[in-house]
Image (cartoon, helix red, strand yellow):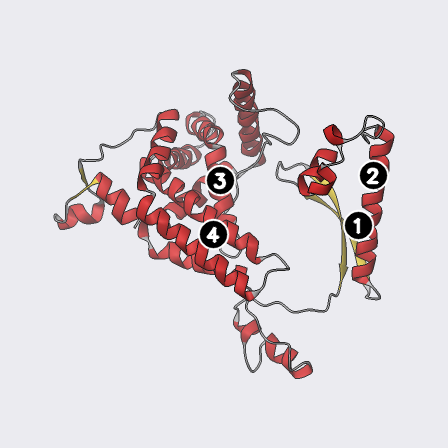
Amino acid sequence: MLKLIASYNKDVQKVVLGNAPQNAQYIAPDIQKQILQIFAQKVQNEIRKEIGDSKFCIIVDESRDVSKREQMAIVIRFVDGGQGYDGASNMRGEWNGLQALFIKDCPYAYYVYCLAHQLQLALVVAAREVFKVHEFFKDLIFIVNVVSSSSKRHDELQDRQVTELEHLVEIEEVETGKGLNQIGTLKRPGDTRWSSHFKSICSVVKMFNATQSVLEKIATYRQATCSQRGVATYALKKLLAFDFLFILHVMQELMGYTDALCRALQHKPIDLLNSMDLVASTKSLIQKLRDDGWENLLQKVLLFCNKHDIIIPDSQVPYFDFIRSRRNKDVISVEHHYRVDVMK
């Protein structure tokens, strides 16, 4: 716990653990409990302060964490005076929208469209404008849905991750420690959920071996129906295709920049000028990736493919797809396709 606190506060870091006197280590169990109790009291005081005289209700329910384990959640609901909008017509409408109702009571309550929501919608629309990227996200959703469609498949995915992690620890390819190497689940991308596409991509990259194993088991399981085996086989072919994996890494690199921007836009202290600077710097990073990022990205993809025994196409042979083969013209190389048609 002290390590966690010290990682967030340099002043605390100077006086705890290795920097603390021998008679003031604060690592005894009783002292740790006292520190936790102090933190809990401070959190409770902040909640009381924020609620004030508002009416509230308490909701107690079960909720699953990222590893699908049931956790009890206690939620306090109350009315917090403020405003926030998305771009829906019932929100932004100047005559009958929510903003119009606010302005009637408070003329200075101006309508401000949530920047993080705008960014998410812009990314979704931009992705749909590039055919290969649009096709990639359809395949990504399909793969995630097939693997996560039942609790049995979810358990199988987790078991595969545990087996893989034990092997990596045995050969000393990963570090061990509390909080490291968590067993997770595949994330579904959603058009209105901030950063959900990036999280979905990262989950597939991280759990690639486990995902492949689950699909292979379904595809070869004799007691499964023909439909189930066919769907799993199709998903497996998509997952192991170089086309899919190349765009997977392109979008992971690209959305890593936009995810940082999205998280920054959600910070309370941020202002308009800083937001504009962040947008400009993100655009600059994306442009740099587009202009100079080909070699590094290609090496990253090739290393991933070699590690997982994925067939890599010859970069200099002609690239044909259904549309080009029908037209019988505009013959380009495989490298040109990925470097220009996909990345540019």
Query: Label 3: which residue?
Result: 202
Which residue is painted at 47% across and 26% down in the image? 223
Please state which amino acid type lies under the numbered disc 1: Val
Query: Label 1: which residue?
Result: 43
Point out the tag, 1 or 2, that comes first from the N-terminus: 2
Point out the tag, 3 or 1, that comes first from the N-terminus: 1
User: Which residue occupies the extreme left position in the image?
Assistant: 329
Q: Nearer the viewer, mark 3 or mark 1?
A: 1
Local packing at callout 4 (Cα closer than 10 Å; few below 14, some 14-19, many 20+) is many
- Label 2, secondary structure: give it: helix
Point out the tag, 3 or 2, that comes first from the N-terminus: 2
Query: Label 2: which residue?
Result: 35
Please state which amino acid type lies under the numbered disc 3: Cys
Q: Nearer the viewer, mark 1 or mark 2?
A: 2
Please state which amino acid type lies under the numbered disc 4: Thr
From mark 3 to mark 4, how far is it between C-alphas? 14 Å
Tell whether label 2 touches label 3 (CB within 8 Å): no
Is residue 310 shown left or right of residue 275?
left
User: Which residue occupies the extreme top position in the image?
Assistant: 170
Point out the tag, 4 or 2, that comes first from the N-terminus: 2
Q: Quadrant of residue 95?
A: bottom right
From mark 4 to mark 2, how far is it between C-alphas? 37 Å
Point out the tag, 3 or 4, that comes first from the N-terminus: 3
- Label 4, secondary structure: give it: helix
Q: Quadrant of residue 99?
A: bottom right
Asked whether residue 1 appears in the rendered view, the answer is no
Q: Find residue 77 and name its label.
A: none
Point out the tag, 4 or 1, that comes first from the N-terminus: 1
Q: Find residue 258 and name its label.
A: 4
From mark 3 to mark 1, how far is it between C-alphas? 32 Å
* Residue 279 vertical position relative to residue 294 in the rendered view, above or below: below
